[in-house]
């Protein structure tokens, strides 16, 4: 990593995007998980347009099972990769619902998970390695859920964040998982959850994949990409 102060980066981003937060709409933790899964290789705007049509009556894993796989796929047909996403969401719903039938409060060790179980009748784990066992839930999806719902300090990294921090020179990595590991180490715990959203907003409005707005960028004095233009 180059000698770039990560706290300086985050301070500047907070000034630029003080209201940065997740853009996916949800009311229940299960809806949040669905939306994150649907958002892979799709936009938050498209996901919100799609889920707005059925989130009034799809709140839990059982709701997915009740309407059936084919009907659910039809509802998400406007989302890219809807077929595989539908299959994975349905399988994950089945696992969560089956678990809920065999679960009691005494089986749950974490107070936050107990609160979820008591309120919603199901429990989605707060453990990264348990979450990535669900079909279609990779590390990035799991970390976004942990960060947003449980407020667990973690640093999800997608292709956009990976691109941004490599461009600036915060890291020099080839894979998202490597980037995530380094950012987890260098970003203070109390800033990790917000940092994820700050980088997303920066990538969405400034450091675009094509034609980034380098001349007016906050970091063109230190950015390695801009220096090499």
Image: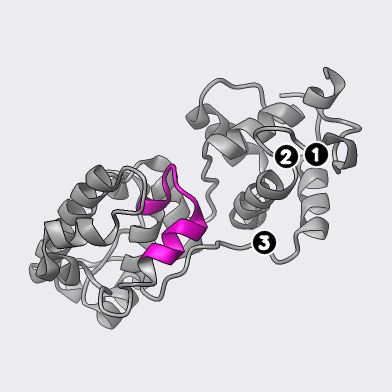
> Is label 1 in a helix, a strand or a loop?
loop
Q: Residues within 10 Å of mark 1 (few under 14, many from 20)?
A: few
Whether tag 1 and tag 3 are in contact, CB under 8 A, the answer is: no
**Magenta-drawn stretch contains 47:** yes
First along the sequence among labels 2 and 1: 2
Which residue shows up at 33% across the image and 77% down it?
115
First along the sequence among labels 3 and 2: 3
Say if 134 sits above or below 14 in the image.
above
Q: Nearer the viewer, residue 110 or 123?
A: 123
Residue 58 point in image, percent of width and height: 26, 73
Q: Nearer the viewer, residue 124 or 214?
A: 214
Whether tag 2 and tag 1 are in contact, CB under 8 A, the answer is: yes
Q: Give the labeled residue for mark 3.
A: 20
- In magenta, the rendered stretch is 37-50
Q: Is residue 189 visible?
A: no
Quadrant of the drawing holding the C terminus: top right
Report the coloring of the rendering. one colour
Q: Give the labeled residue for mark 2.
A: 207
Q: Residues within 10 Å of mark 2 (few under 14, many from 20)?
A: many
Q: Give the labeled residue for mark 1.
A: 213
Q: Main secondary structure of the magenta part?
A: helix
> Is label 2 in a helix, a strand or a loop?
loop
Quadrant of the drawing holding the N terminus: top right
**In the image, 176: left or right of 57?**
right
């Amino acid at each position: 990593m180059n000698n770039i102060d990560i706290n300086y980066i985050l301070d500047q981003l907070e000034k630029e995007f003080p209201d940065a937060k997740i853009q996916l709409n949800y009311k229940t933790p299960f809806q949040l998980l669905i939306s994150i899964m649907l958002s892979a290789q799709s936009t938050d705007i498209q996901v919100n347009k799609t889920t707005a049509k059925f989130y009034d009556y799809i709140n839990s894993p059982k709701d997915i099972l009740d309407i059936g796989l084919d009907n659910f796929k039809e509802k998400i047909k406007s989302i890219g990769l809807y077929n595989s996403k539908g299959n994975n969401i349905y399988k994950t719903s089945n696992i969560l619902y089956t678990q809920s039938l065999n679960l009691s409060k005494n089986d749950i060790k974490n107070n936050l998970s107990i609160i979820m179980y008591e309120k919603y009748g199901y429990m989605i784990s707060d453990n990264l390695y348990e979450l990535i066992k669900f079909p279609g839930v990779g590390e990035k999806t799991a970390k976004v859920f942990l960060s947003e719902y449980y407020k667990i300090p973690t640093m999800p990294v997608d292709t956009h964040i990976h691109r941004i921090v490599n461009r600036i020179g915060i890291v020099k990595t080839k894979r998202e998982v490597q980037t995530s590991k380094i950012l987890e180490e260098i970003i203070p715990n109390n800033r990790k959850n917000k940092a994820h959203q700050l980088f997303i907003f920066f990538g969405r409005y400034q450091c675009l994949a094509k034609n980034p707005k380098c001349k007016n960028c906050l970091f063109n004095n230190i950015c390695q990409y801009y220096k090499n233009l």
